Amino acid sequence: MRILVIEDEPKAGDYMRNGLTEAGYVVDVAVNGVDGLHLAQEFHYDLILLDVMMPEMDGWEVMKRLDKQLNTPVLFLTARGTLEDKLKGLELGADDYLVKPFSFAELLARIRVALRRGVQVKQAETLELADLQMDIPKRRVIRAGQRISLTNKEFNLLHLFMLHEGQVLSRSAIASRVWDMNFDSDTNVVDVAVRRLRQKIDDPYALKLIHTVHGVGYRCENES
């Protein structure tokens, strides 16, 4: 497995490079967002560890550009630990958010979860619902013959919905499965993510597939 570390602190970068190499991973390190984005676009990585506060291009901007082109799992590693920052990172499409300082054992555990989830996605089959098709290995979504561009997180959210067609999924269940985290009941990260997905999957079409179950969560189903 090949990991890209985008971290502007040399000591932190060397620490992760050495530890991850000892754990059996192949590791590249970029010391700023511009170089990190270039490496991510030029080479294949199984996982990206991304700092937020960096010169030239911060982690938020790197994530925005990565998510439009790649489906590589991304873990934010940052000293910015407020709930607002965590939600921002996750809503941008990151798979996890780890606040510094953290133990290396926890980092390895988070990496294993993200990589395992990625392997499971690759092993899944093509899913269909009405005129919507999802090719999981190719991470391609087509509706009514038109290809739809989704971010990594939007794809994972739609994948969860289609795997559980017709079932009501609570907001807490969605947060746990898609983000691998538990959210406070008063946060709206799931609602925001579903709204963005609907804008691409449902809004342009007469037949709606994602339905709100008031007071509970959401259900994906062809009700025609």
Image (cartoon, helix red, strand yellow):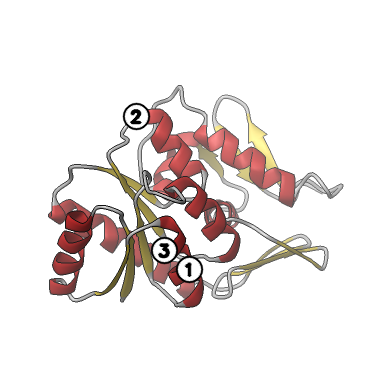
| Circle 2 Cα neighbour tier, 10 Å, few/some/many (<14 / 14–19 / ≥20) | few
Q: Which label belongs to residue 38?
A: 1
Residue at 87% across / 47% down in the picture? 206
Compared with 203, 46 (above or below) is: below
78 or 73: nearer the viewer: 78
- Tell me if I can see residue 18 in this picture: yes
The mark that comes first in sequence, 2 or 1, is 1
Q: Position of residue 111 (x, y in %)?
A: 28, 60
Write down the quadrant of residue 147 in the picture.
bottom right
Residue at 39% across / 27% down in the picture? 184
Q: Which label belongs to residue 82?
A: 2
Compared with 3, 7 (above or below) is: above
Amino acid under label 1? His
Q: Report how far apart the C-alphas of labels 2 and 3 lie in the structure.
A: 24 Å
Q: Which label belongs to residue 36?
A: 3
Compared with 83, 16 (above or below) is: below
55 to the left or right of 191: left
Instruction: Check whether the beta carbons of the residues at disc 3 and disc 1 lie within 8 A of each other.
Output: yes
Callout 3 secondary element: helix
